[in-house]
Image: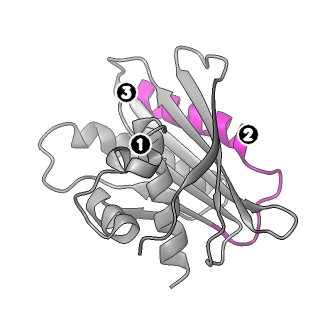
């Protein structure tokens, strides 16, 4: 289901550090999509890097998609409790910056699940994914959870095409690109 995913007006800024966490914010707009949503959230959790993306329908005719993508870098060598705390706190911080005070009625979300067949790090990533899902649930958002290949198949038409390799998104940071794919997946799956 490939439509025009061209990003326009991309600006990049670094947010103030959050404890030892580095956060880069990327703003952009996209052409309107014929899908029924007002807000979509995508999260690509990770041990050291995490991507978060929000897509809002806006403009005077509700014909522009405004995006905010966040590339998060956690301190390395975190323990289980630190990883969960960092993930939850950073997501709450990003949500406080990116989400409206009152969520729109048509809000969708997706958290990237484990990559089936991946050999290393899946247990630690499961903890980060769980923290991401809990953060969304705390905000009264029930996410879809899907493996990377499923997200890629729906968004790009090919389960092997990685978001960071998609030429129209080449200026986005890699985890932000994956989070954008998650946000688009949530939109596409909700509209069916």
- Sooner in the amino-acid sequence: mark 1 or mark 2: 1
Secondary element under disc 3, as helix, strand or loop, is loop
**Residue density around tag 2, few if under 14, some if 14–19, many if 20 or more, within 10 Å:** few
What's the residue at 51%, 28% (across, down)? 86
Which region of the structure is painted magenta?
A: 82-107
Which secondary structure, mark 2? Answer: helix
Q: Residue at x 37, y 37 (%)?
A: 46
**83 left or right, relative to 27:** left
Kindly check if marks 3 and 2 are in contact, taking CB atoms under 8 A apart as contact. no
User: CA–CA distance between discs 3 and 1?
Assistant: 9 Å
The figure's colour scheme reads one colour
Dot 1: element = loop
Q: Position of residue 12 (x, y in %)?
A: 61, 30
Measured as percent of width and height from the top left, residue 2 is found at: 42, 71
Q: Residue furthest right?
A: 60
**Residue annotated with mark 3:** 48
Q: Residue 175 placed where, x, y %?
A: 42, 39
Asked if residue 34 shows in the view, the reply is yes
**What residue is pinned by disc 1?**
45
Find residue 56 and report its image quarter. Answer: bottom right
Between 3 and 68, the one nearer to me in the picture = 3
Badge number at residue 96: 2
């Amino acid at each position: 289901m490939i439509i025009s995913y061209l990003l326009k007006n991309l600006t990049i800024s670094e947010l103030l550090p959050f404890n030892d966490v580095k956060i880069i914010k990327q703003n952009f707009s996209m052409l309107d999509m014929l899908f029924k949503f007002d807000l979509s959230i995508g999260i690509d959790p990770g041990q050291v890097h995490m991507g978060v993306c929000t897509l809002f329908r806006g403009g005077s005719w509700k014909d522009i998609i405004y995006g905010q993508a966040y590339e998060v870098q956690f301190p390395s060598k975190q323990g289980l409790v630190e990883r969960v705390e960092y993930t939850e706190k950073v997501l709450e911080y990003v949500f406080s910056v990116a989400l409206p005070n009152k969520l729109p009625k048509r809000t969708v979300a997706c958290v990237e699940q484990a990559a089936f067949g991946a050999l290393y790090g899946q247990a630690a990533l499961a903890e980060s994914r769980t923290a991401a899902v809990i953060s969304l649930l705390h905000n009264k958002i029930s996410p879809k959870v899907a493996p990377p290949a499923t997200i890629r198949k729906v968004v790009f038409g090919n389960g092997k095409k990685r978001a960071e390799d998609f030429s129209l998104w080449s200026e986005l940071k890699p985890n932000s690109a994956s989070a954008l794919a998650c946000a688009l997946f949530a939109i596409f799956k909700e509209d069916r």
